[in-house]
Image (cartoon, grey):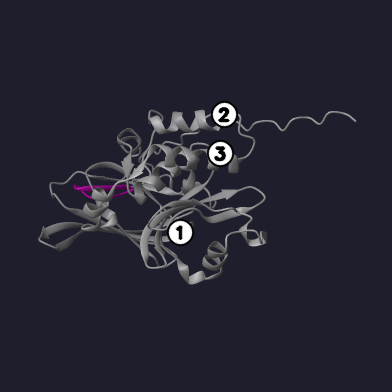
Amino acid sequence: APTPEPTPARDSTPQVLEPSAPGAETYGNASVTIDCSNTADGYFMVNYAGGSPKVRMLVDGPDGVQYKFALNGGWETFPLSAGAGSYQINVYESAGGNEYYPLYGVTVNAPVKDEFATFLRPNQFVRYDADTAAVATAAELAQGAETDLEVVDRVYNYVLEHVDYDYGKAEVASRGSVQNFLPDVDETLASGGGICFDYAAVMATMLRTQRIPTRLDIGWAGDIYHAWVSVYVDDVGWINGIIQFDGHEWKRMDPTFADNGNQEEWIMDFIATDSNYNVLLVY
């Protein structure tokens, strides 16, 4: 019998779709500029140039979900997580304490071209560029892999091996809010410590730059508030919660669990209960 041809390895060359603010469609005033030139690619950019030390932005999408962001000055990138549709963007400056006053607001129509555009690019919570060390590391990990799922496994195992859960950082983060906590993927890998948000941001960075659409999901798993990762794989579709943190450890979920009677009982029971997973925000 003829020897079967080996399955070719997938292309592991990094793809870094860096955001830009070309100014073709902008809104704002002397303090803030909102650049919506690239909404078809699933994002918009904001440049806050005012003098307030605390600035907040609320984004209400076509799915009825409200996202809250802190603006830190300079150009920052924000996802259009709900896909195509109308978005209301409102920026507020601090009036002292917990009070804010409106600075600028606009409604924009975002013709996001597909469900993957947002989740193949960096944003304020999944920050990277061509020089980010995690991008090169992901390319090394992906070399020789035959499938996207193999890349997911390699990235997952690498992050678990190189990052330990930082309970001190978790305690500090718990006193604030998601909007005030911005993961730094290279710092996480260099320090070897992070919380669930850091783990998810590192994995999302590595997988997105390997052309694997990846969502960083934030919400509730049972009674635990945390972040996890979902990916899109050809011939399978979106695998929700493929990498999950249950408050104690990370688990790589088998995308065939629904058809696999050999899965551990607790996995089958947990997955069978839809209320166990409640996604609130997607980045």
Closer mark to the observer between disc 1 and disc 2: 2
Q: Is residue 149 left or right of residue 26?
A: right
Q: Secondary structure at mark 1?
A: loop
Q: Say whether residue 68 is left or right of residue 216.
A: left
Three-letter residue code for mark 2: Gln
Residue type pointed to by label 1: Ala
User: Distance of mark 3 from mark 2, alpha carbons?
Assistant: 9 Å
Is disc 1 in contact with disc 2, using a CB cutoff of under 8 Å?
no
Q: Which residue is mark 3?
A: 151
Q: Nearer the viewer, residue 3 or 45?
A: 3
**Which quadrant of the rendered structure holds the N terminus?**
top right
Labels 1 and 2: the sequence-earlier one: 1
Query: What percent of the width, then of the height, locates residue 17?
Result: 46, 36
Residue at point 29% right, 55% down?
A: 178
* Residue at the spot 52% in from the left edge and 71% down from the top edge: 273
Label 3 sits on what residue type? Val
Nearer to the camera, 233 or 43: 233
Task: Mark 1 and mark 3 in contact? Answer it, CB < 8 Å.
Answer: no
- Camera-near label (1 vs 3) is 3
Instruction: Mark 1: give few (<14), some (14-19) or many (20+) Cα within 10 Å.
Output: many
Residue 62 in magenta stretch = no
Magenta span dominant secondary structure = strand
Please report the bounds of the magenta region as a residue range: 26-34
Please indicate whether residue 88 sits to the left or right of residue 211 in the image: left
Q: Where is mark 1, residue-wise?
A: 82
Q: Is residue 30 above or below residue 100?
A: above
Residue matched to label 2: 143
Q: Secondary structure at mark 2?
A: loop
Q: Which mark is residue 45?
A: none
